[in-house]
Image (spheres, rainbow, N blue to C red):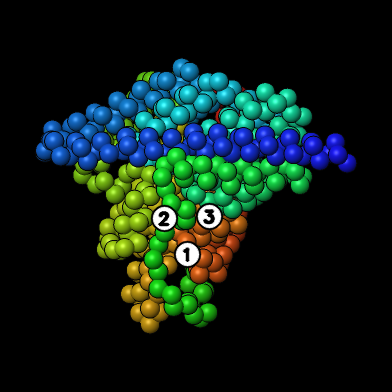
């Protein structure tokens, strides 16, 4: 009995160490991205006209090509979000070489996300977290099932500190990694410990106050049960969009690979050039989109602008990810969904003016719905959006939207995006 208690305590202490280390690295990572991301504002203050556009395009293009070069030469598995690499490692199909992943993912992730590409910071922090776990696990000489459990704990800790959402991160392991995660009380508690400590420590590093990262203010008036079927329609729409987004990500990656065999670095150079131009002429169409969500929740744009953003951000999201630089898709998914939800809500208000529902409500529900349709993790989508925005009063519309979006995507034959990405890199002849 005492031996088992000591073993549990040792395992929990190891998870606590992982949580603290991930919180420190995750906090530094996010602070560095915030600092680097200010360069477009600085450039706008010092240049004008065509010089401004040209320099912006050249800067983003140069950063993109540099990051792709470093990743391909030093750590090809550091490309993209890294979630598929972690799941592959937990299945024994991939190896987390933390010695090269940590520095490459950390520094090129800061540059690529800060450059203006449509990427999220959560993917790299998840991969960084798992890499920290791989290092600690190797030093602690853990058993295989404990090693896998600690990899999941590090990954979840990375997600927790990325979005200040420890509960959603805990559920992410149970829902997204259910095939790979060795379920047991001690492993699940280890994940919880790592998530909590990573969130707290990251907040101390960045100086962020506890609470939702993207707190949104919405009317307190409850939504009538008569209006809830509208969220089913929204979910159906998001199911189709999520299915299309996953196919778009895979297609763009295939195009990138094809281009690389003919003219190396042409694809990332072209994407970087386009994103750099958009940073000046249409800034809402690029970057991860966290700021966009906050802005649009305060002042809803016109329907025409929202539809244009949906179209453009769909392509900038898929193209940015396909360049092969480190970066996640969670934040781009959420910002794209916010535009879809606001457009849907604006249209619903025109067609059904008696509803009186704030379009932002549909935007919040859409964020969860598109996440569920793409990642195939509806429970995580519900809790993640509630934690991220603080809109717990919208749990029922969120549940309806996420469930209908998930069912629709499954009915269309869609698979979880990370499962599809893992299958792609495991194919014979794959570049990574």
Q: Earlier in the sequence, mark 1 or mark 2?
A: 2
The mark total stands at 3
Image height of 217 relative to 428, above or below: below
Between circles 3 and 2, the one closer to the viewer is 2
- Count residues near mark 3 (Cα–Cα under 10 Å), then give few for <14, some for 14-19, many for 20+: many
Q: CA distance from mark 1 to mark 2?
A: 10 Å
Q: Earlier in the sequence, mark 1 or mark 3?
A: 3
For disc 3, the marked residue is 384
For disc 2, the marked residue is 214
Check disc 3 and report its element: helix, strand or loop.
helix
284 vs 97, nearest the viewer: 97
Q: Is residue 104 visible?
A: yes
- Residue drawn 27% across the image and 58% down it: 305
- Residue drawn 64% across the image and 28% down it: 136
For disc 1, the marked residue is 391
- Residue drawn 59% across the image and 39% down it: 19
- Residue drawn 42% across the image and 27% down it: 107
Q: Is residue 422 visible?
A: no
Check disc 2 and report its element: helix, strand or loop.
loop
Q: Is residue 182 left or right of residue 241?
A: right
Image height of 234 relative to 313, above or below: below
Q: Is residue 364 left or right of residue 398?
A: left
**Which residue lies most toward the front here?**
2
Q: At which x and y percent is residue 427?
A: 60, 28
Image quadrant occupied by the N terminus: top right
Q: Earlier in the sequence, mark 3 or mark 2?
A: 2
82 vs 232, nearest the viewer: 82
Q: CA distance from mark 1 to mark 3?
A: 10 Å
Q: At which x and y percent is residue 254?
A: 47, 32
- Count residues near mark 1 (Cα–Cα under 10 Å), then give few for <14, some for 14-19, many for 20+: many
- Count residues near mark 2 (Cα–Cα under 10 Å), then give few for <14, some for 14-19, many for 20+: many
The reply to whether the C-beta atoms of the residues labelled 1 and 2 are less than 8 Å apart is no
């Amino acid at each position: 009995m005492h031996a088992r208690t000591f073993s549990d305590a040792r395992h929990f202490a190891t998870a606590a160490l992982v949580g603290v280390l991930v919180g420190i690295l995750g906090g530094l990572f996010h602070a560095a991205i915030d600092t680097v991301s200010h360069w477009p504002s600085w450039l706008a203050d010092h240049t004008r006209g065509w010089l401004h556009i040209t320099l912006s395009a050249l800067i983003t293009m140069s950063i993109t090509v540099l990051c792709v070069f470093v990743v391909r030469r030093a750590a090809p598995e550091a490309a993209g979000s890294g979630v598929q690499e972690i799941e592959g490692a937990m299945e024994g199909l991939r190896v987390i070489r933390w010695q090269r992943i940590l520095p490459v993912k950390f520094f090129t992730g800061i540059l690529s996300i800060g450059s203006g590409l449509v990427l999220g910071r959560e993917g790299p922090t998840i991969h960084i977290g798992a890499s920290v776990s791989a290092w600690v696990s190797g030093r602690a000489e853990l058993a295989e099932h404990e090693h896998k459990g600690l990899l999941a704990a590090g990954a979840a800790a990375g997600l927790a500190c990325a979005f200040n959402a420890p509960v959603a991160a805990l559920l992410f392991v149970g829902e997204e990694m259910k095939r790979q995660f060795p379920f047991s009380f001690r492993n699940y508690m280890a994940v919880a410990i790592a998530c909590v400590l990573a969130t707290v420590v990251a907040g101390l590093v960045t100086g962020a106050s506890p609470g939702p990262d993207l707190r949104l203010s919405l009317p307190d008036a409850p939504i009538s049960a008569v209006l809830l079927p509208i969220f089913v329609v929204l979910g159906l729409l998001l199911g189709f969009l999520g299915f299309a987004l996953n196919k778009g990500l895979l297609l763009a990656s295939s195009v990138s690979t094809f281009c690389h065999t003919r003219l190396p670095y042409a694809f990332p150079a072209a994407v970087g050039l386009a994103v750099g131009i958009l940073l000046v002429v249409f800034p809402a169409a690029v970057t991860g989109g966290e700021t966009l969500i906050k802005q649009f929740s305060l002042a809803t744009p016109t329907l025409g602008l929202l539809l244009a953003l949906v179209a453009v951000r769909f392509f900038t999201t898929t193209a940015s990810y396909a360049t092969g630089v480190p970066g996640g898709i969670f934040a781009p998914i959420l910002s794209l969904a916010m535009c879809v939800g606001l457009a849907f809500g604006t249209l619903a208000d025109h067609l059904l003016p008696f509803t009186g529902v704030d379009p932002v409500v549909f935007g919040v529900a859409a964020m969860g719905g598109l996440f569920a349709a793409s990642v195939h993790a509806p429970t995580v989508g519900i809790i993640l959006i509630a934690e991220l925005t603080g809109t717990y009063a919208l749990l029922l519309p969120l549940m309806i939207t996420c469930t209908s979006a998930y069912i629709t995507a499954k009915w269309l034959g869609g698979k979880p995006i990370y499962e599809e990405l893992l299958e792609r890199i495991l194919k014979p002849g794959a570049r990574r």
